[in-house]
């Protein structure tokens, strides 16, 4: 348990630890700055409540002045320390976060497991109760606060017993936990179970039932009495066998609004996940199309949600696949506050074994969508009890950069990465550059060997690591590639499922035509024969082969680059060990996928490379 | 827990229960016969120790006389009662079991789960200890004894902690359990962990190390002191990540003999499973062929095993697939006593949801092999804590018939089934016949929709229920169909992996030629194009389509037949519920497999039936 103390991710250049007893962001800011400047410089941290989350840093004769609001002082202090430690320019002028809610969703279950967790067991749940080292939770709060994350939902959106008791028996423990994070500007959020009234004696959880409404109002009162700054409730309803308002013939607006009204008096936000689809689909049915589901369900409800409801929408229409188009719901809702949801946990992107830096995804997403389309931002946590916090030491870069993007969606992926690397290691400048370059390209490399042309879901069922081209093909999850001997992909144009019609122009026309559709989404939107000629003159099948060979070769090059970095132990050995596994995985993906399409198409590789039979 | 008392499987027409305190087979035989004959008849049961397992039944003025050995009296009594209850002729002349060891292997783990169990949790393990109702274990012993099963291995061959303690801390509990079964002629057997000496302080488990030998000798002494009639040890070594002699560069003969010598002084048998293969195979490698593994490993060791070693060989070279040829090892070993192993647990044969009566498999196996090729017989249990013992009430027919075949491998599958049905239900004669007919054809129906032409392993990974044509295709288990757009199957002739060379003539030539190879093994031995013309003039692909359509239609006919049976509750509802699931499964198998081969081959169904895209 104690090993984490020496593995402080990007806080490596700051104070070893944070003492107990610092009970406000101001106190933390003062402590951190005092501990940081050992060269005679000093930072003068001043509270200006008006500024709230914002801050301004100015230079003084012997150091810096940080002026900020109640949490702004903290963000200012950390921004200053990050810049100084990384040798970068101090941010000038008033700094203000773009999103008020910068959320992390933890899928930690009370049995101690983390759903889709790749960094060990839960840091705070074990054996159906809270179980943690308070010093580590303070360190966690410090990590989060240092990059501006301010909402932390601690329990799995799939709320299973006894997590329901976070609202009653376990509420005092939750309040103690909340107090540990509060000095770092981090507010707790709780995932709730829509059917919970029925587990507390009511015969129904119908949102229009007055007893249900009264039960939630009463519960909210108790909960906020215990945790006055609780950020809100997070709800996964009517999805993947979770209960929800549909059970009672009610709309999601009726369900969400009922909860929103219960918590409104306390300033709580009701975050409602839009991840709802038919998870009992029949693969024989070619008309039902899972990517259509969220838009079809929620677009007609636009304008009917209460003002403290936030609809949390995954960035793509499926489920965190390596390559998806932007969810059309994010472009379609006009009157409903939305949060965009990303997944730091590398469920489909390499399990924190394979390298996969997500900054590029966020850059592309905000560039395409426009940051103003959403009111908040959320990401599924990649944290766990592992000593190095995130399983792969480099996976911490995603959490770090996520904080920067949540604060400022105009952030630059490379700059974020560079700062993370500087704060995390003390590599020579050229090596630091190589580390940054390696991670910057990691996403494209992973895409090349796992999901070229927008092919997705060709993963091992359940685990989602490694290839299985038909693994999800005949299942009930709506996840098909429909590859046969002639063609592959799903026609989502007006001639097919019509999904593309959910997009506004010009995207609609762009995607609808295989001649204009971006290559990396070609098979997401179109069903094409293997002989289809791509923009660069290659056939579709040749492109599939090429990308898989390329992806593996690129992974090998990354392994070489990694070997040339003088990382400290044990990060060096840990990263090397995982890279070996990544190479094995990349080889499997290359060979299995190429063999699969070779078996189907019969097409030979033009370059005569080895494709197994 | 008490529900089982009214669900006594085929003992339904005998006494309700067996009282505690009957401590010998003779006492049980006397009690059972006295309780059975309520019409003034009586059975005179007499012990003749010379007869051991054997018995003779004669008619007397007012009933019957049963003369038998210590266990023979029990078998005689039950044979008499079974015949009388079923309205059949009494066996005449001296009756003697063909195999001395008629074994059941239970894969019960001490955490209460049953590996590949489909009838609920373990009947005797829970929470890392023994946990059972003694009355139910007596009833279990009675079921086993009533069909002549005489060895019962109670713990999983994958021996995980704390099952190692069955040899020390838990030994007294095992002895108590053994005592419950002893009056029914059933002797306990224990699965052991080859590496156990290392868990008890030794630095090695090398079978040639004298300390290891001494440890096992000492352990055997203690174990047999506690359970003097323990039948022996069962060992899975060097298989699927289990430890074994190969770890120390020793042969399996050296490993087995070391253990055999430790237990020989006590009359124990060392049952050594021959289920050893490379479970980390590379799918790219077309020369390694898993079905070759057992023969390649064990044939060279023939003649080197001690006389109290029994090599336990699965009936087929793979792993209880729906259709496999006879294991060539069973035909190849000349000097080594072998047990043939079957699997009553329906791992690959429908999970005790789908109907699958195994009598036909046993008949075919013994007819082809010759019963004298093996010295003993074993089967993996299909029992569990479910009230009806076997999950599906009809699955009990497999356990019942197994006992009859173990006693007499010349048994008739239909006669065994008929007796089971008569003992289990009181259906009118025509309905009894329909039940028997339905179960008799169940195996062929299941084969039609899941595994025609010897195709195997096209199951969902891990669970092994339902179709996934490529689910095991790119895995490490050596389980491939290598289907592509032109052909399917593996060439196991001399031109391919050479597996067929492990068979003696005339089988070798029969299997080697696709013109003479039985249809049901065609794709097991050969790789053939979809246009290959079968003996009946149909193409291979048409036969695949036809069998899958036929299998589903046959399953529907079975459902109709089932609906016409006046079974008692709750068997009626339970069987109906499972039949509904079977139909769903059969439909999935039909459509997924047909679609898979249609996508690959592009061939249309000649009869124009619906094949989904």
Image (tube, coloured by chain):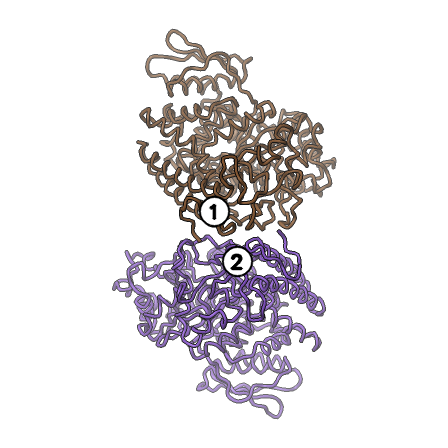
Chain colours: A purple, B brown
Mark 1 neighbour class, 10 Å CA radius: few under 14, some 14 to 19, many 20 or more: many
Comparing A281 with A228, the one in front is: A281
Image height of B113 relative to B41, above or below:
below
Q: Is residue A72 visible?
A: yes
Would residue A133 be seen by someone viewing this image from the given angle? Answer: no
Mark 1 chain: B
Along the line of sight, the residue nearer the viewer: A173 or A548: A548
Q: Residue furthest top?
A: B61
Residue occupied by mark 2 = A458
| Residue found 47% across the figure and 63% down from its top | A319
Q: Give the side of residue B75 with respect to residue A265, left or right.
A: right
* C-alpha distance separating marks 1 and 2: 19 Å
Residue A268: image x %, image y %? 37, 72
Q: Does the residue at mark 1 contact the one at mark 2 (Cβ under 8 Å)? A: no
x and y percent of residue A210 in the render? Answer: 25, 64
Quarter of the image for residue B231 reads top right
Where A102 falls versus B603 (above or below)?
below
Question: Does residue A120 appear left or right of residue A372 in this picture?
Answer: right
Residue denoted by label 1: B593
Residue A567 vs B228, above or below: the answer is below
Mark 2 surroundings within 10 Å by alpha-carbon count, few (fewer than 14), some (14 through 19), many (20 or more): many
Secondary structure found at label 2: loop
Q: Is residue A117 left or right of residue B8?
A: right
In the image, what residue occupies the spot 66% across and 62% down? A607
Tell me what residue is drawn at x 40 percent, y 8 percent: B60
B236 with respect to B205 (left or right):
left
Q: Give how far across and how far down residue B48 sits, in percent.
A: 52, 12
| Callout 1: SS | helix
Callout count: 2
- Chain hosting mark 2: A
Same-chain status of marks 1 and 2: no
């Amino acid at each position: 348990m104690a090993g984490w103390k020496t593995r402080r991710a990007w806080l490596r250049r700051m104070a070893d630890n944070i003492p107990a007893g610092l009970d406000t962001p101001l106190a933390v800011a003062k402590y951190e700055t005092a501990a940081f400047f050992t060269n005679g410089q000093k930072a003068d941290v001043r509270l200006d409540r008006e500024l709230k989350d914002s801050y301004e840093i100015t230079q003084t004769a012997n150091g810096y002045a940080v002026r900020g609001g109640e949490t702004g002082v903290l963000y200012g202090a950390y921004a200053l320390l990050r810049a100084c430690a990384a040798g970068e320019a101090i941010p000038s002028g008033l700094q203000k976060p773009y999103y008020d809610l910068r959320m992390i969703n933890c899928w930690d279950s009370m049995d101690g497991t983390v759903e889709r967790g790749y960094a060990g067991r839960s840091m705070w749940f074990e054996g159906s109760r809270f179980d943690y080292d308070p010093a580590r939770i303070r360190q966690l709060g410090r990590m989060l606060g240092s990059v501006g994350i301010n909402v932390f939902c601690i329990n799995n959106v799939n709320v299973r017993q006894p997590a329901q008791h976070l609202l009653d028996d376990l509420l005092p423990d939750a309040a103690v936990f909340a107090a540990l994070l509060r000095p770092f500007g981090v507010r707790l959020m709780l995932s709730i179970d829509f059917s919970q009234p029925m587990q507390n004696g009511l015969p129904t959880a119908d949102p229009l039932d007055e007893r249900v409404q009264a039960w939630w109002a009463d519960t909210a009162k108790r909960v906020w009495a215990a945790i006055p700054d609780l950020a809100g409730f997070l709800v996964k309803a009517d999805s993947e066998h979770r209960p929800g308002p549909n059970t009672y013939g009610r709309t999601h607006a009726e369900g969400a609004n009922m909860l929103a009204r219960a918590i409104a008096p306390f300033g709580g936000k009701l975050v409602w996940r839009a991840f709802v689809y038919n998870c009992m689909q029949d693969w024989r049915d070619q008309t039902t199309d899972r990517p259509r589901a969220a838009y079809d369900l929620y677009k007609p409800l636009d304008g009917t949600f209460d003002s403290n409801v936030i609809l949390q929408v995954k960035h793509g229409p499926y489920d965190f696949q390596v390559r998806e188009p932007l969810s059309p719901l994010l472009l379609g809702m006009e009157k409903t506050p939305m949060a965009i949801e990303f997944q730091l946990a590398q469920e489909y992107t390499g399990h924190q074994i394979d390298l996969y830096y997500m900054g590029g995804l966020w850059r592309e997403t905000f560039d395409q969508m426009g940051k103003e389309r959403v009111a908040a931002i959320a990401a599924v946590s990649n944290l766990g009890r592992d000593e190095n916090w995130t399983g792969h030491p480099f996976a911490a870069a995603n959490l770090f950069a996520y904080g920067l993007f949540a604060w400022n969606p105009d952030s630059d992926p490379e700059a974020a990465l560079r700062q993370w690397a500087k704060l995390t290691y003390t590599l020579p400048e050229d090596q630091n550059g190589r580390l940054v370059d390696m991670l910057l390209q990691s996403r494209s490399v992973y895409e090349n060997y796992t999901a070229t042309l927008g092919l997705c879901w060709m993963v091992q069922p359940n685990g989602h690591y490694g290839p299985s081209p038909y693994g999800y093909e005949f299942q009930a999850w709506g996840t098909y590639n429909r590859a046969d001997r002639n063609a592959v992909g799903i026609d989502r144009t007006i001639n097919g499922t019509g999904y593309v019609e959910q997009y506004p122009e010009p995207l609609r026309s762009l995607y609808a035509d295989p001649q204009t559709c971006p290559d990396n989404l070609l098979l997401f939107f179109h069903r094409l024969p293997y002989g289809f000629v791509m923009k660069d003159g290659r056939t579709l099948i040749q492109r599939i082969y090429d990308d898989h060979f390329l992806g593996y070769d690129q992974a090998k090059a990354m392994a070489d680059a990694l070997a040339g970095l003088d990382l400290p132990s044990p990060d060096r050995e840990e990263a090397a060990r995982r890279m070996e596994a990544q190479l094995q995985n990349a080889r499997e993906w290359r060979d299995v996928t190429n063999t699969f399409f070779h078996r189907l198409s019969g097409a030979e590789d033009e370059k005569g490379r080895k494709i197994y039979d």
